[in-house]
Each structure stands twice: as structure tokens, then as C-alpha cells.
Image (cartoon, rainbow, N blue to C red):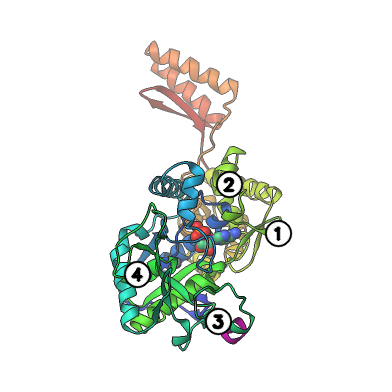
Amino acid sequence: MKLRLYDTYTRSLREFEPLRSDYVGMYACGPTVYDYAHIGNLRTYLFEDFLRRTLEFNGYTVKHVVNITDVGHLTSDADTGEDKMEKGARKAGKTAWEIAEMYTQAFKEDIRRLNIKEPTIWCKATDHIKEQIEFIQCIERKGFTYRTSDGIYFDTSKLKNYGYLARLDIDGLQAGARVDVGEKKSPTDFALWKFSPKDQKRQMEWESPWGIGFPGWHIECSAMSVRYLGEYFDIHCGGEDHINVHHTNEIAQTEACYGTRLANFWLHGHFLQLDAEKMSKSAGEFLRLQSLIDRGYDPLAYRFFCMSAHYRAKLNFTWESLDSAAYSLDRLRNLVYEWGEPGTVHQDWVERFRDEVNDDLNLPRAVALTWELTKSDLSPADKKATILIFDQVLGLSLGDWEPKEEVIPPQVLELVEKRQQARQQRNWPEADALRAKVGELGYEIEDTPQGPKVKRKKG
Ligand code: AMP
Ligand code: ZN
């Protein structure tokens, strides 16, 4: 089956065809680095990793761009409230630049621990202020901006299709608008450039043609995606919360300047819920990947847990379901380990697997097929070779896993010890006979410069 993906823009499943022959351009909105990522955020990055791996599984080269939002994301989507970075810095007693660096590193460590492939390009908002200013100038030249006392705003009434991605009811929004739109002409208008407050120096601020200030949140993604992927590229993705405001505004900016809707496909991962509540960083308490590790979980158990639901379904986090994912993963790893050396890949199984992931990334069914393979009548070696191909998408490092602490039975250890003594006495026939006895018990000895290592024979 050819790859089909659900495109939020058209609200339909569409067959994926790349726009260019040399690579698939994919832009994923990255973290706002004012705090650690919570496991909900990480569900979205896992979904994007499954997407990338599925594209690669289909033979495409993916240029995967992820931005780091280190300025301009206000605590309210309505362009009011404080900059999340400056607030986070105050809370941590550090500078905004310091916390940006600290939480960026923590984020990179989290995705490494989850086997999420490193993006081809990381780009920081603060490294692209010039591009953002130029983009705003382009929008200004096209006549889509106006000025208020606190910034330069995008006039959404001027864009014919504004809000199409979210199917926004603009008239309804206008009618229901409460008074606090401030100087904005419409509740959907949004800031492109905000001025620094007159009475206060911000930690992060820049000169611009309009005055000292900082970019609005949405402009960074339009400016950096055009820089790294061009005016119209294959796939843009993020969490479902981005549909109404952030992605809608990214599209508005790019449409105003370049006349394209930015990306051919728009994909959105649904939320992880904790006790049926939306997990949100700004709500204070949240679970990090480290919180799971502190409780003794392998980070890949969380990856496996996320495969239990389709990315377009909500997923409820409970410790019981994480336990069951950890248990299943352990069982799978042990099976694969016991199968020994890989044999021949069974292409019919690989095609069945492709059908599942190509059906809009149906990971729950791909995992079910994986269990079916374990119970099939293929030889252990062929199961192993085939499952390692599945693992290119699953990303569980099944081929590298080894039981951590193997308990070697005392009688085996005793034989190994006797063999060492025989070797020291240069009694080679005796040493060989003892090695053979160890082999009969299902163990093998590897002689290393640090001494003999015993492990269970594979297969
Ligand atoms: P942020 O760092 O807040 O900009 O969010 C980073 C990413 O996580 C975005 O793509 C959000 O859509 C996504 N996200 C936020 N909360 C959740 C959640 N509870 N479940 C899944 N994804 C989320
Ligand atoms: Zn974005």
C-alpha cells in the first residue's frame, strides 16, 4: 500500500507524493525552552519520529527541521501576558539565555533517550532575528500590517482565507469578542513584532525598523521554514493545540508574503492526557521523562506505551498502562534476544507491516502484527531478521538489547573457574573438555583481556 496521511488542511486521508525528487521537507514545531518538556510534549515528538521513520521506510530522504522557541512565546495566545522565557528565567533565578541553553540541552537528552532521530537541522528563534524582521517587512509591503502602541500586528481581515486550517468561524468570533482585544482591530489579529515596554529593559530585545522589541511567536516558524525548506514544502506538523492559533497564523504569514499555504500536508498529533486532564507545562506540576526514569522505567517503555494508541486519538496516561507497556517491551526484547543471530528477511511480512504503517501510521496495528510474527512458524533466525526491519520504524533498538544481569548458575561458574586453573597449568585438553561441559549446560565462554566472560548461548 502506498503511504496515506491524514491532512488536517483538507480534513482527509491523502496519498503522499513528495514535491521534490531529492528529499521530503518536514518541519516540526519545537519546544519553548522555558522549562523541561513534559511527557505530553514528548508524545508529539514521538509521533513525528514515527512519521519520519515511516517516510524513510518508504525510501525517502527526509530533511527534518525542528525549531527551538527561545523568545516571543507569551503566556497567553492572545498576545498578552509575559514572555514565557523571561518568566521562566525569573522563576529559576537565571538569565533567559541561560535557561534557554539549559532546557534545550535537557530536551535533546530526552529525545536521545527515546530513540527519536536527531533532526537534520535545529534552528533557534534568536539566531534568526534578521530573517524574521525581513519576513515582517515582506508582509508589511504586501499591506497586511498595522501598528498599535505595543507592536506591529497582522490584519487578518485582509486575508481572504484566514482561519481555513482551523475552520474558524470568523464572524462568530467577532460577535463573541470580549472587550479585551486592546488596540487590535479583530480578536484574530496577532503580533508580528512587539515593542519592549518603555519603563523596563527586557533581557532579549533587538533593534528593528519599527523600534526595539522582539518577534511574535508565529513569525519564527514562517521565517525559518522558508529559509531551510523553501516557500512550499511537504509536511508541517505539531500538536493538535497548534491548529487554531499557531499554525493558522503561520499559514496567514506565508500566504501574505509568498501566496502559498506553507506545506502540502498538515499533520497533528493528539494530546496525552493525565487523569483525563490536558497536561500543560504552564499548569505547574507535570511529569517529565526523568520522573519515569526515577521510578525505574526504561525510557523506551514510554515509547512503547505511545505506540498503543493511534496518533489521532487521545491517550490517557496511567502508571498501570505504563507498567503493562514496560512488561510487554521486556517480553519482546527477551524473545528477540533468544532468537540469536538473524537469518533471512521475509518480504511478505515486511509488506504486511508496511501496509499498517502506511495507513496513516497505524502503530497499534503494526505492534499487533509484530506480536503475530513472534508467534508465527518462521524460524527464530528469520523472525529476528524480519523484526529488525520492523524496528526501523518502531525504533526500539531490539537488535542491540541484551539482558542486563544474567544470573549464571553456580555449577557453570565452577566449571569456568576450573577451566581457568587448567589453562594456567597449560592443560589444554582439560580446559577444552571443561569448555565443552559449559557448552552442554547452554553457556559459552568468551576469553577477553579482562578474563573469561560467560553468557547464555543464543538461539
Ligand atoms: P511547547 O513546548 O509548549 O511549545 O510544546 C511543544 C509541543 O508539544 C507542541 O507541538 C505541542 O503541540 C505539544 N504538546 C503540548 N502539550 C501536549 C500534550 N499534552 N500532549 C501531546 N502534545 C502536547
Ligand atoms: Zn511553529
Q: CA distance from mark 2 to mark 4?
A: 48 Å
Q: CA distance from mark 2 to mark 3?
A: 39 Å
- Residue that numbered label 1 is attached to: 276
Say if mark 4 contacts mark 3, CB within 8 Å.
no
SS at badge 2: helix
Whether residue 319 is situated above or below residue 17 in the rendered picture: above
The kind of residue tagged 2 is: Leu
- Of circles 4 and 1, which is in front? 4
- Residue stretch rendered in magenta on the structure: 166-173
Say if mark 1 contacts mark 3, CB within 8 Å.
no
Q: Is residue 372 left or right of residue 195?
A: right
The kind of residue tagged 3 is: Ser
**Residue 210 circle label:** none
The 10 Å Cα crowd at callout 3, few under 14, some 14 to 19, many 20 or more, is few
Could you say where residue 271 lies in the image, as x and y percent from the top left? 60, 63
Along the viewing direction, whichever of 140 and 100 lies nearer the viewer: 140
Q: CA distance from mark 4 to mark 1?
A: 36 Å
- Residue that numbered label 4 is attached to: 223
- Of circles 1 and 3, which is in front? 1
The 10 Å Cα crowd at callout 2, few under 14, some 14 to 19, many 20 or more, is some
SS at badge 4: helix
- Residue that numbered label 2 is attached to: 335
SS at badge 3: strand
Q: CA distance from mark 1 to mark 2?
A: 34 Å
Q: Quadrant of ligand 1?
A: bottom right
- Residue that numbered label 3 is attached to: 12
Of callouts 2 and 4, which one flags the residue occurring earlier in the amino acid sequence?
4
| Residue drawn at (52%, 81%) of the image | 163
The kind of residue tagged 4 is: Ala
Could you say where residue 444 lies in the image, as x and y percent from the top left? 48, 30
